[in-house]
Image (cartoon, rainbow, N blue to C red):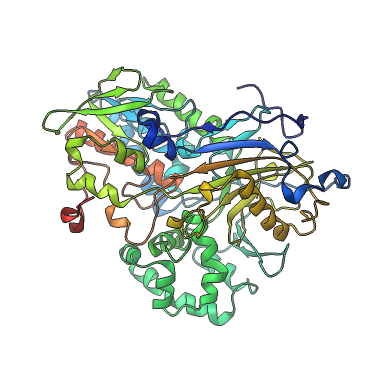
Amino acid sequence: ASPPAGPNAEVPAARLLAAPTQVGSTALQSQPSAMAALAPTSTARIGHARPLRRQQQALRAAAPRRLRVTAKDFPKPDLDSENFRAAAALSKKLKSLGEKGVEPKTVAIVGGGLAGLSCAKYLADAGHKPIVLERGNVLGGKVSAWQDEDGDWIETGLHIFFGAYPNMMNLFAELDIEDRLQWKEHAMIFAMPDSPGEFSRFDFPSWLPAPWNGVWAIANNNQMLTWPEKLRFGLALLPMLVAGQDYINAQDELSVSQWMKKYNVPDRVNDEVFIAMAKALDFIDPDKLSMTVVLTAMNRFVNETNGSQMAFLDGNQPDRLCQPLREYVEARGGEVRLETPLRKIAVSEDGERVTHLELAGGEQVTADVYVSAMPVDIMKLMTPEPWKERPFFKQLNELEGIPVINLHLWFDRKLNCSDHLMFSRSPLLSVYADMSTTCKEYYDEEQSMLELVFAPCGPLAGSEKDWIAASDEEIIEATMRELERLFPTEVKADGSGAQLRKYAVVKTPRSVYAANVGRNKFRPSQETPVENFVLAGDYTSQFYLGSMEGAVFSGKLAAEVIADKAVGQPSKGIKAVPEVVLSKTY
């Protein structure tokens, strides 16, 4: 790609950007009619080329006023915790296996997202030869990004790195790229719906350890919850604090809303906090989201002093994170191949082994072991016929990806937005950030570029309207109405305020798996009943659910399965399939 022209580049008013771009997993092209609908689509347009109805008066706008927003990064926090040490120990184990001179296995990995790249990295550490096969022309999967013809980056999603991501943090250290994380102030910032333009903060003091820093943050915020509401909520969390992960897992049969009613938590706690948390964690309303998801996050934040502290990557994900992974793998004898879409997983007559992968161009890829690092929806489509009635693979039918829309809005002036992730508490928007302030590569002192998550955006997630089917213009219109509340002095309904120069709409019909009530038990282990076939992906069984950490951890666990078997060590085994799957017809 050519060097970025930057957000201040002159944009001819009559020029439209390129036709919609599609990216996604390796397998998407092999069955166009079924798979094309699952791929993220992006349409970027120049605001003045196709004016929005609510901005028809843009030409009468006053000259942009100057506003300077200071960006300040914070030192890397102390991330030492039991989970961080466990992640480091697994990395050390895999590397030690490679140092024993094990006979290398050739491993074909389908999918060049974080799960596939993580699997390849740790297989290389363990002395094996990974071959990553990525359908698209860019790495990253759900964190992929690409440049428009102005050189501006379009990202599949707004991605935040938490201190409570132990495998991700170890990965950054192992790749020697920790300096690429821009740590922000340890706080959570929520918009106040009834007070347009105002925000409420939860500040976590650095001088207090967990859980007391969280107690302090909640106790000192009196805008969102009253003291009786805080106490009722705190009492409801006691079983989690006492019983830990076993209790958390058991709450998967309850939605967030059902759990709150069961424990007599006031409705205002849901309205003030949990709607925003649910949409940020999995793009789902609390009426549908499993309480296990929320409690998992809260458990990490409560037990790890800096678990809730956030960082932004200092640039685009393909260059700043995926490329170092690729270089690491290739430097150790592995391969990473782009534009190699999968057509078929070929298996033996009895279905007990994978014999080869057939690519869309007719090439056959043969390996000792095969890994699917494809999203669950694609894996279901690519499942070989002999496997479809096997309970292990049948359970995948209980999982599906959640729809989500990511937006980029370029304005003609600087908006007053904090150097942080913002919880919008909007019925249409989840979280947002001014990337021209938070991210070094996108930094601009004169003009803002907001990146926003539009969610929930489909019935599966709790929305009455199917926003994936809506036009880009309709989505932007609705978003601008919400921004009038978030930026009341700057974004005006009459078009007299900040002007939208350009926008990009990225629709992902199937993103991370939908963590609806009761889904956790159907998430499969990385090890499968097929001797030389392993799964990776955030939908597979691991503690970190549908997240970047979950993807990286799943790839690492998949590598562990292969590495253990290669040296004759016992693996963790295959997770039991719920009985309901055995008799169910899909």
> What residue is drawn where x is 54% and y is 47%?
405
| Quarter of the view holding residue 345 | top left
Q: Please indicate, yes or no, whether residue 359 appears anywhere in the rendered image.
A: yes
Above/below status of 106 relative to 181: above
Report the front residue among 26 and 84: 26
Q: Locate residue 493 relative to residue 121 in the image: left or right.
A: right
Q: Please indicate, yes or no, whether residue 307 appears anywhere in the rendered image.
A: no
- How far from the left and from the top, in percent, is residue 348? 15, 28
Quadrant (top left, top right, bottom left, bottom right) of the N terminus: top right
Above/below status of 95 relative to 233: above
> What residue is drawn where x is 20% and y is 58%?
580
- How far from the left and from the top, in percent, is residue 518? 32, 61
Report the front residue among 44 and 552: 44
How many marks overall? 0
Residue at the extreme bottom: 228
- How far from the left and from the top, in percent, is residue 292? 38, 62
Q: Locate residue 162 relative to residue 519 in the image: left or right.
A: right
| Quarter of the view holding residue 535 | top left
- How far from the left and from the top, in percent, is residue 433? 64, 49
Q: Locate residue 411 relative to residue 399 in the image: left or right.
A: right
Report the front residue among 545 and 309: 545
